[in-house]
Image (cartoon, rainbow, N blue to C red):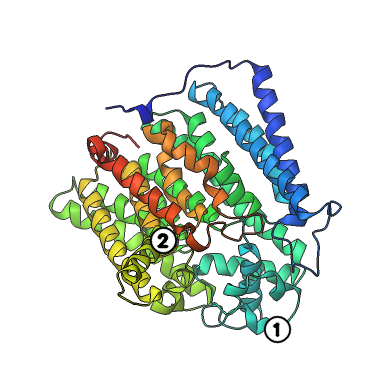
Amino acid sequence: MKTADSLPLSPVSTEPGTFRTWAVVGCAGSLGLALTGTRVGSIPDPGHMLWWFAVPDAGDVVLGLLFYLSVTLLVIAWLGVGQRARSGALTTKQAWLLLGLWAIPLALGPPLFSRDLYSYMGQGLVAHSGLDPYAVGPAVLGPGHVLGSIASVWRKTPAPYGPLFVAGTRGIAALFGRAITAEVVALRVLELLGVAMVMRYLPRLARTIGVDAGTALWLGVLSPLALFSFVASGHNDALMLGLLVAGLALAAEGRLVLALVLCGLATAVKLPAAVAVVFIAASRLRPRQGRQRLSTLATVVGVPAATVALVTWASGFGWTWLSLGALHVPADLRVLPTPSVAVGNMFTAVLHVVRIHVRQDTVVRVTQVVLGVLALAVVAWLVLQVRTTNVVRLTGLALMVVVLAGPTVWPWYLLWGLLPLAATPAQRSKVLAAAAALGMLVVGPSGTPILQGGLYIVVVLGCAVGCAWLVRGRRWHGIVTADVV
């Protein structure tokens, strides 16, 4: 079953010269982002520090225009390479070359689109100092460049991540202390390990499923959203997804125990990776009967649980990271790109128009709970549909549902579902391609959400259009049953 959204793009030239042109254009865009980002990006302790290199201050307007011109160059280059990828002509070797050309400038430049790298640094320093990073926030470090670099909303917030990642930040803090530039680069190296795992295992997963490996890498790793999220912003989602994709690939190859260990490690980085464990378990249990089912159940439950328990014990942080307080941390910040927040704001405005005065916070919280329950119901239904032949696709869809219905949505969260889907026939979806090209642009260069004030209407309209698109012609059914997205 195909729709207009799943049809391949028109064939275009795949000559080597065209490929080199797009490679150079994308590299120019990355260089421009790294340079202009030293003034308009997420620089350390704004007003007190600059990155280890910086361009002259030409004014916010000029630098902002140059920054987004660089973004445009990278997006255009990625779309140009996409023509080659969708024709089946992009090789894994070429994808590695593009990753090097487009990612190295971003890896050497300042953080862009987010200040989370500084939060990771603060949490690592808290842990290195002997305090519990799941009980106190970086504010206990006291005034200084490190605290000044962390977004104000996260300075008093305990770590919301798993013990494997926090232990990694503690190790980096032990090596580099409060040297901000060195810590940022070291944390990026940690995330680049996750990118390398995706580069290694995503093509294997795609080939096992029977789709093009080059297109999978183009959509999943080389996209502006992935480069900005994994490299420029240095989000730990890269490490989580590297382990998760490796786990899915090994599960598809029949190496169940090692796959579950990797998915358990991914869960110990960020908890949403546990969704993959659920779908792998369901796919293995369904065809089993009697004692065989009991044996499989012991494996799919025991292996990831033992992995998480071992990591938690070895980290020395205890089980606080799974407490309700820690799990609630990501929901503390209300950002308008989040559908539940935008819809809650809309309901509040409508109620006020009809003279029913309720607190916006209450309405948003109720909306988040309702959408959360609906998301759990959808995920449970997807689990009932799982087979060994569709486990990767349904895992990706479930993660996308969890993200879009979650209490807080940042653009890099979209990669949770997008990467698994990139290794399925859904890799040809124009909807996913649009998200991969433009998703990060809902936040500014320094990490501040662009959608503010009454612009929640934009998100609400987008949600309405999306729901209408899903309902029309029962596309939702095609998405679940026929690899159409």
Mark 2 surroundings: few (<14), some (14-19) or many (≥20) residues within 10 A: many
Label 2, label 1: how many angstroms apart (C-alpha)? 35 Å
Of the 4 image quadrants, the one containing the N terminus is: top left
> Residue 216's x, y, as percent?
48, 34
> Residue 454's x, y, as percent?
48, 61
- Residue at x-position 19% and y-position 51%: 292
Q: Is 163 situated left or right of 38 in this image?
A: left
Indicate which disc residue 342 carries.
Answer: 2
**Residue 424 visible (yes or no):** no
Q: Is 312 situated left or right of 190 in this image?
A: left
Farthest-out residue, right: 56
Indicate which disc residue 142 carries.
Answer: 1
Secondary structure at badge 1 equals loop
Amino acid bearing label 2: Ala
**Residue 162 visible (yes or no):** yes
Mark 1 surroundings: few (<14), some (14-19) or many (≥20) residues within 10 A: few
Indicate which disc residue 153 carries.
Answer: none
Nearer the observer, 289 or 452: 452
Nearer the observer, 355 or 10: 355
Q: Earlier in the sequence, mark 2 or mark 1?
A: 1
- Residue at x-position 39% and y-position 50%: 461
Of the 4 image quadrants, the one containing the C terminus is: top left
- Residue at x-position 31% and y-position 35%: 483
- 2 or 1: mark nearer the eye: 2
